Amino acid sequence: MVKKHFETLSSVAPDGSVREPSKTRARQVSHIDTVVGRRIRLRRTMLGLSSEDVAEKIGVAHQQLLKYEIAQNRVSAARLYSLASVLGVPVHWFFSELRDEAAALADAPSVKGPEGENRASGDELAELVRLYAGIADADIRQHYLQSLRLLLKASEAK
């Protein structure tokens, strides 16, 4: 039985001999996998959800979710659909960074310092957005934005 199963998985050479199945090459992480994983983590942290909470809701171990987030494992279409539902975003949201990447780099102020180090990590930005969105009073939000604008000007003046 095992031999028969093995033979069906093997390929047959033109001379009729059975070749052993070839080893699969190690999967390389693509830019798309990285972007999707980063967006999953961004949205999860924006909502203040733990990896355990989200993983349970989509039916995987939290370690698996973390592998999705760091692009160690690819996210299937079905799993991405579940994630979109749990995280409250349309599926295309996970890819919107790809579409807008060039425009965002050209138009947005850089978040890199002079030596290329990040001033603000994705986690910091996600927390900032989550905290900002949690401010119910519109006047306080506007005051906060004005304060940030003044801080940025002072920082650029140095």
Image: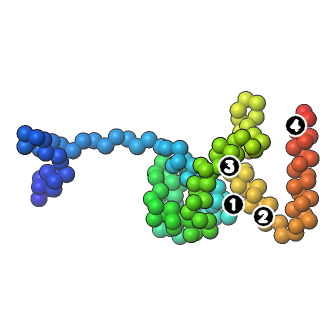
SS state under label 1: helix
Q: Please indicate whether residue 123 sits to the left or right of residue 151 in the image.
A: left
Q: CA distance from mark 2 to mark 4?
A: 26 Å
Residue for point 83% across, 66% down: 135
| Residue that carries the numbered disc 2 in the rendered image | 133
User: Is residue 111 among what the camera can see?
Assistant: no
Q: CA distance from mark 3 to mark 4?
A: 21 Å
| Residue that carries the numbered disc 4 in the rendered image | 156
Q: Earlier in the sequence, mark 1 or mark 2?
A: 1
| Residue that carries the numbered disc 1 in the rendered image | 46
Q: Earlier in the sequence, mark 2 or mark 4?
A: 2
Q: Earlier in the sequence, mark 3 or mark 1?
A: 1
Residue type highlighted by circle 3:
Gly
| Residue that carries the numbered disc 3 in the rendered image | 122
Residue type highlighted by circle 2:
Ala
SS state under label 3: helix
Residue type highlighted by circle 1:
Met
Q: Please indicate whether residue 79 sits to the left or right of residue 20 in the image.
A: right
Q: Is 156 above or below relative to 135?
A: above
Residue type highlighted by circle 4:
Glu
Disc number for residue 135: none
Q: Residues within 10 Å of mark 2 (few under 14, many from 20)?
A: few
